Amino acid sequence: MTSDERVCAAIRLENPDRVPVVPTLLPEPAARLAGLSQAQVAANSQLAVDAIFKVFDEYGGWDNPYLGAYAPIQLQAVRHYPMKMLIPGKDLADDRTFQLDEQEILKPEDYDTIAEIGIDKFYYEDYLWRITDLRRDELPGTFERVVEAVMSFANQCALRGTRMFFGADSLHPFFALSLMRSMVPFTQDLYYNPAPVERALKRMTADLITSQIRTVKQTGVRRLLLVEERASGFFYPPAVFERFWLPYTRQIVEALWSEGIVTIFHLDQCWDKNIPYFRQLPRGSAVVELDSTTNIFAAKDTLRGHLCLHGDVPAALLSIGTPEDVASYCKRLIDKIGSDGGFILGSGCSVPADVKRENFRSMIETGKGYELSRK
Amino acid sequence: MSEDLSSALVALKRAEVVELVKLRAGRGEDPFAILEECRHGMGVVGERFQSGDYFLAELLLSAEIFKAAAAILDPYLAKAGSREPLGTVVLATMQGDIHDLGKNIVATLLRANGFEVHDLGVDVPPSLLVEKVKQIRPDFVGISTLLTTTFGGMKEAVQLLVQAGIRNELTLLIGGGVTTPAVKEYVGADFQTTDATEGVTYCVRTAKDKRARKANL
């Protein structure tokens, strides 16, 4: 099996020749492992791409590289992080990772503007200029550099006989609004004035479906990463989840699936109480990526034969554990979750920026070499 | 004790709580008694959170309501004189991290439980944290983080507390999404949690035990 066939088989809930390995290696941990500063990769998306593939080669490679072709300011420009940022080499020391500065930027009256004119128009005509240090005349060039970096990333994958794990990525509309409005005011809106939030969610969902189907098709990798870190039962009761998240999510997944596109959910925080809802999605239409705060073993019991899981070597383990601890955890994942297919081994959320080299190597080598599940 | 105020807080009726607190404080009722009713409501919210009936969202909303009520009562409380806090806490998000949501919830819940809280904010260097601890001499120090890159700073802060000879005078808590029992051992903390109410319950229990031991001396 090729690397990409292995990943596709797992997503189709088949049992590949071994458990595929896809660590969430973004530019921040790649910088550390490649011997670069955070300021260097934050200033140059091509350098960020180069760092990821330098690590890929030095550590023997893995199945699909996780798309991380960005400099932080570009994430603001493409609406991935609709927040103020502190950037190494500019706002922070060279060795610090970039930081998201959550503030109440979106105002209550903005919900209806989004509902009326759509999120793209609102973002680029108004909102972006409330959060960014970019000048308006820098935006076209910034987009060009994003496209160049993504194309370079795709080419680097092709040179190594594989493909990107996903073709495009987007924040879930619920998560995007929570970041733009900030957590406490957004929660107050949900409880005390929900109608405008719902109008905005409805429009953003429609906008996301249209734009992301187009983008994913252009990349040729029919998988979309959908990021959601705040809708789970860790934060909200089922009534909120069922009203403000689930219907929009089903709409997105079903629209993408009808075009042959798989949704990869990046789900941070504890989703234990929400995992059963994912059985409502079409079989094989999504991958559920967990960060180690959700009980992945229980999630497997609930989603076995229905959706593929991806995860979840804990960040703290990669940061302060030993290679033996990491190997032991990976073996447990492979034995308990991977032995019957439908599983991709990866890090819980991102590989941390202070990952130990020996721990990263242990995760990759154990993932690729441990064969107990085949016996 | 009036059930209205604490019940309104438990039901997350923000406007009603604010109106009741203003009304009762304005007509000269004991501000400490009013505050106690709000604390009672927060206690019920905490119990519901622990039992799984309430979620973090309700904890957040109740904390915001409590803050609004406490802000109204502050001038009345200042006039009425001070009462001894259950304990003193220094809180900080470690250097290298500017997340403050979890820390802010803990700060409000601690205040609602009668603690005096010194919140040093975010991105706090270990040396500054230790300097503040030397000045304030708190019963508890709570360090919050969402990034593994701060673990080294946490460990350094503990080592500085040891060097200053004050580590054993206080209880050290760490919390945040990336912390684990192994991180607690690595850092040298006394308690670790990813649940704000669990941390606050630990502080309340520890402070009450300490007070009881003092009373028995």
Image (cartoon, coloured by chain):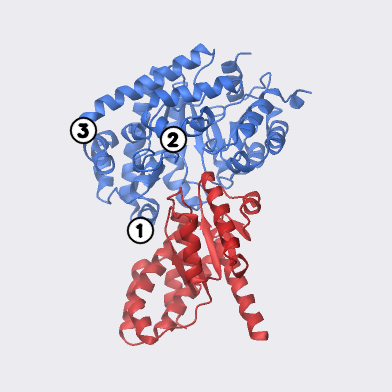
x and y percentages locating residue A308 in the rendered image: 59, 30
Look at 59% across and 41% down and name the residue there: A319
The letter of the red chain is B
- Kindly identify the amino acid type of the residue bearing the numbered disc 1: Tyr
Judging from the image, mark 3 belongs to the subunit labelled A
Of the numbered discs 3 and 2, the one sitting upstream in the chain is 2
Residue A38 image label = 2
Residue A142 at least partly seen: yes
x and y percentages locating residue B209 in the rendered image: 64, 76
- Kindly identify the amino acid type of the residue bearing the numbered disc 2: Gln
Element at label 3: helix
Task: Give the answer, above or below, for where A45 lies relative to A159.
Answer: below
From the viewer's perspective, is the residue at label 2 or at label 1 nearer? 2
Look at 61% across and 76% down and name the residue there: B208
* Location of mark 3 (residue): A136
In the image, A35 versus B101, the foreground residue is: A35
In the image, B214 versus A16, the foreground residue is: B214
Q: Colour of chain A?
A: blue
